[in-house]
Each structure stands twice: as C-alpha cells, then as structure tokens.
Image (spheres, rainbow, N blue to C red):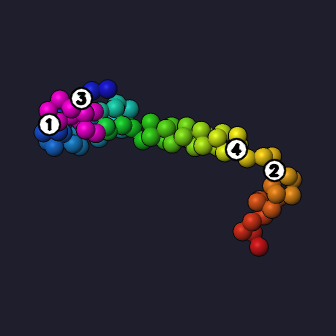
Amino acid sequence: MSDVQTADAKIQLSSLFDDAERGETLVLTRHGREIATISPEVVFQRCEVAETLRELTEFRRTRGRATVEEILSWRDEGRR
C-alpha cells in the first residue's frame, strides 16, 4: 500500500489506475490525512462477498428452520 498526495494524483491518475489494476492499493492523502483509497476490484468483491456471508449467517440465526414446502415455493416463485 502506498500513499499518494492528491496534488500528485491529479497528474498521475492514469498510472495510479494501472497500479491498482496490477493489485496495488493506494491511499490518497491531503495534508497528511487519508481521504480516499484506490484498490483493485478484487479487493472490493472480496469485501462484498464477506459482508453478504455475514448477513446470511445473521439471517439464519434470527430465523427458524424453513419447511420443504417453503423452500419449494421460494424456488418456484416467479416461474409462473
């Protein structure tokens, strides 16, 4: 992970995207304070998958068990 000043980022934006595409995460800073992160799409997708799994796990904890009829109904929903 590398830090890039916003003033430099304006000039080097295309090359910063190239770096992110190669897997590098970049932190944009202004006056030494972090303001944004440029990261590869894969990192975002992994975070999104992890969040979805967490939500599903929480959902399963708060719900009772589904019956076979409910599962089949959900499967067939929208097929008619």
The Cα–Cα distance between marks 2 and 4, rounded to whole angstroms, is 12 Å
Q: In the rendered image, which quarter is residue 6 located in? A: top left
Measured Cα–Cα span from mark 3 to mark 4: 42 Å
Residue underneath mark 2: 66
Is residue 22 visible in this depiction of the protein? no
Which residue sits at x=73%, y=47%?
63
Dot 1 or dot 3: first in sequence order is 3
Q: Earlier in the sequence, mark 1 or mark 4?
A: 1
Relative placement, left or right, of 10 versus 51 is left
Query: Is 34 contained in the magenta span?
Result: yes
Q: Quadrant of the N terminus?
A: top left
Question: Mark 3, residues whose alpha carbon is within 10 Å: few (<14), some, or many (≥20)?
Answer: few
In percent of the image, x 16 and y 43: which residue is there?
10
In magenta, the rendered stretch is 27-36
Q: Write the residue at 17% across / 29% down.
A: 32
Of the numbered discs 3 and 4, the one sitting upstream in the chain is 3
Q: Nearer the viewer, mark 1 or mark 4?
A: 4
Task: Give the amino acid type for the residue marked by disc 3 in the picture.
Answer: Asp
Mark 4 surroundings within 10 Å by alpha-carbon count, few (fewer than 14), some (14 through 19), many (20 or more): few
Q: Is residue 77 left or right of residue 20?
A: right
Kindly state the secondary structure of the residue where label 4 is placed.
Answer: helix
Q: Magenta residues: mostly which secondary structure?
A: strand
Local crowd at mark 2 within 10 Å, few (<14), some, or many (≥20)? Answer: few
Examine the structure image and report whether residue 7 is included in the region drawn in magenta: no
Q: Which mark is residue 8?
A: 1
Q: Amino acid at mark 1?
A: Asp
Q: CA distance from mark 1 to mark 2?
A: 55 Å
Image side of residue 37 versus residue 9, left or right: right
